[in-house]
Image: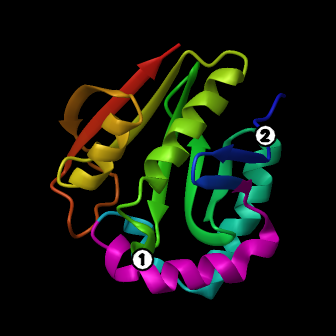
Amino acid sequence: MEHPPETIASGPVVLRRRRAADAAAVDRLVTESLDHLLPWMPWAAHHDAAAATAYTADCERHWESGEAYDYAITCDGQDVGNCSLMRRIGPGGLEIGYWLHPAWTGRGLATAAARALVEAAFALPGTGRVEIHHDAANHASGAVARRAGLTEAERRPAAPDAPQASGECGIDVVWRTTR
């Protein structure tokens, strides 16, 4: 199976493959970002050092299996967030997810990371579409998707069994671009 590059430079960011050794950095970033993440990321409510260790171990397994490709978003040599390409939207598609430490928002870094992941996704054989999904109340995520060149494709009720974070309204917005 072909994988995307382990390091991707795009404007102000460098994306670097997440490794198990990143657990302490992930723990610090998430802990410092909890107030920023809790309204939008259901997993943030269960964050602790063990969760960071489990996540980074999963990053290694997911990369090898091709299930997901997780990256540290770095800027000026600092780890400032996370982004991923995930195979969870069906054959021929990859979904992008992202978040930043709040001290690094508003600088175009998430947009640069999303653009880089779109390009990396379309370089992989068999990828015909790339999507970003977010809750309709998360306007910042929608702005990133729009600036990254995706088009809003649909709005739909969140899956009834999907975990919901405190800021979410339960309507998923799907942004899409195709090859």
Which of 86 and 4 lies nearest the eye of the viewer? Answer: 4
Q: Position of residue 168 (x, y in %)?
A: 21, 59
Which residue is tagged 1? 103
Judged left or right of residue 66, residue 97 is: left
What amino acid is at disc 1?
A: Ala
Asked which quadrant contains residue 19, the reply is bottom right
Which of 16 and 44 lies nearest the eye of the viewer? Answer: 16
Q: Circle 2 sits in a helix, a strand or a loop, which is it?
A: loop
Which stretch did the figure color magenta? 16-39
- Would you say residue 159 is visible in this rendering? no
Which of 160 and 157 lies nearest the eye of the viewer? Answer: 157
Report if residue 35 lies within the magenta region: yes
- Few, some or many residues within 10 Å of mark 1 (<14, 14–19, 20+): few
Structural distance between the alpha carbons of marks 1 and 2 = 27 Å
Asked which quadrant contains residue 148, the reply is top left
Look at the picture and state if 32 lies above or below 86: below
Asked which quadrant contains residue 163, the reply is bottom left
Look at the picture and state if 130 lies above or below 109: above
Residue visible at 67% across and 53% down in the picture = 15
Judged left or right of residue 17, residue 55 is: left
Tag shown at residue 6: none
Q: Position of residue 49 (x, y in %)?
A: 62, 86
What amino acid is at disc 2?
A: Pro
